[in-house]
Amino acid sequence: MKNTIKVERAKKNWTQADLAKHIGISRQGLNSIETGKFIPSTVLALRMAKVFNTTVEVLFQLDDTDS
């Protein structure tokens, strides 16, 4: 699964720690999601979308291996 979290964070000038605090997880947890090592729960994905004022589909996209 691909994601655009790093791009969205850059738009807000936020560090991983900043975003992690906004969504209630650790920076290490966010790093795992951002690097694709961990897929977030639906609730967590929705929290991220809300913080960035976007949709889950903008933040997360299936790649060819996920189909």
Image: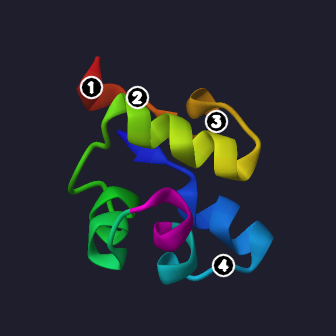
Determine if the magenta segment contains residue 34.
no
Left/right of residue 56 with respect to residue 3 in the rendered view:
right
Instruction: Classify residue 27 as left or right of residue 28.
Output: right
Q: Is residue 22 magenta?
A: yes
**In the rendered structure, which segment of residues is drawn in magenta?**
20-24
10 Å neighbourhood of mark 1: few (<14), some, or many (≥20)?
few
Q: Are marks 2 and 4 in contact (CB under 8 Å)?
A: no
Looking at the image, residue 24 lies above or below residue 58? below
Distance from disc 4 to disc 3, alpha carbons, whole Å, reads 18 Å
Label 2 and label 4: CA atoms lie apart by: 25 Å
Where does label 1 land, which residue?
A: 66
Q: Amino acid at mark 3?
A: Val
- Mark 2–mark 1 CB contact (< 8 Å): yes
Q: Earlier in the sequence, mark 4 or mark 3?
A: 4
Residue 29 vertical position relative to residue 64 in the rendered view, above or below: below
Query: Is label 2 in a helix, a strand or a loop?
Result: loop
The x and y percentages for residue 30 are 37, 65
Local secondary structure at mark 4: loop
Say which residue label 4 marks: 14
Q: Position of residue 67 (x, y in %)?
A: 29, 17
Label of residue 58 in the image = 3
**What residue does disc 2 label?**
62
